[in-house]
Image: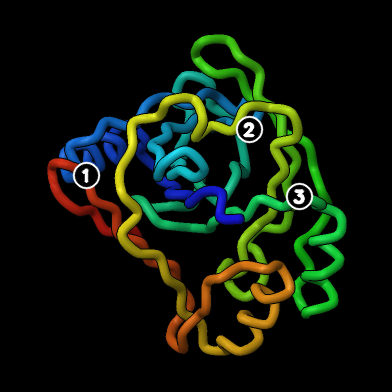
Amino acid sequence: MFDHLVLATDDLRKSVAEFAAATGVEPVEGGRHVGRGTRNYLVGFGAASYLEIIGPDVERPVAGAMPFGIEGLRGARLVTWAVRAADLEAAVVAARVAGADLGSIEPMSRRTPAGELLSWRLTSTYPAPYDGIVPFLIDWGTSRHPAGSGLPSVELVDFGATHPRPNEVNAVLEALEVDLRVAVGEPGLQATVAGPGGTYSLR
């Protein structure tokens, strides 16, 4: 099941402001990723999926690498996406059989601004196989899903992906029981969202 899109940025405040100006919807703070040097803002696509805008935590910086290669970004980019798996271990095996090694499964957690602890597990390889077009996998366990916390929402008008070898990527997506079908083209993810103030393209 589609879980979320990840828009990574080198300037979190700027990217959140640009999103709000374009759509008329203000993303809300998700929280800090302690020890990783990042924090995020969220906006929902309804009750089951969302957009994560993630960037440097300027108040708690870290030396070296940050998630999603944020330390090397210039501007904002739709870097990856996540699929929720009921059986994370089985899904990793299915992806590997189809030709994509998603890496080890790692635990993560963060606290919301209200103090609620969210814990999840996810696959660790970044960029994900096939230039990041294959999603990473996530399991929220017993934690409340972020989209179920009353996030402000926009409509996900469209979401697509391209890759020079779409048949190989699509074989992995089919193994993961993901409906998206990748078209031929340069590697990339594309999405359009719409709010009361207008539409906004993510690439």
- Residue behind mark 1: 195
Q: Earlier in the sequence, mark 2 or mark 1?
A: 2
Q: Position of residue 117 (x, y in %)?
A: 66, 18
Q: Residue at horizontal 14%, vertical 49%? A: 198
Numbered tag placed on residue 42 in the rendering: none
Q: Spot the residue most to the top.
A: 115
Kind of residue indicated by mark 1:
Gly
N-terminal of the pair, mark 2 or mark 3, is: 2
At 42% from the left and 25% from the top, the residue drawn is: 150
Question: Which is closer to the viewer, label 2 or label 1?
Answer: 1
Q: Nearer the viewer, residue 112 or 33?
A: 112
Q: How far apart, in angstroms, are the residues tagged by discs 2 and 1?
A: 31 Å
The percent position of residue 67, horizontal first and vertical second, equals 60, 44
Other-residue count near label 2 (Cα within 10 Å), few / some / many at <14 / 14–19 / ≥20: some
Residue closest to the far left: 197
Image quadrant holding the N terminus, namely bottom right
Q: How many marks?
A: 3
Above or below, 106 relative to 199: above
What residue did someone put label 3 on?
A: 86
Q: Secondary structure at mark 3?
A: loop
Is 54 or 117 nearer to us in this picture? Answer: 117
| Residue topped by disc 2 | 36
Q: Amino acid at mark 2?
A: Arg
x%, y% of residue 174? 67, 76
Callout 1 secondary element: strand
The reply to whether discs 2 and 1 touch (Cβ–Cβ < 8 Å) is: no
Identity of the amino acid at label 3? Ala
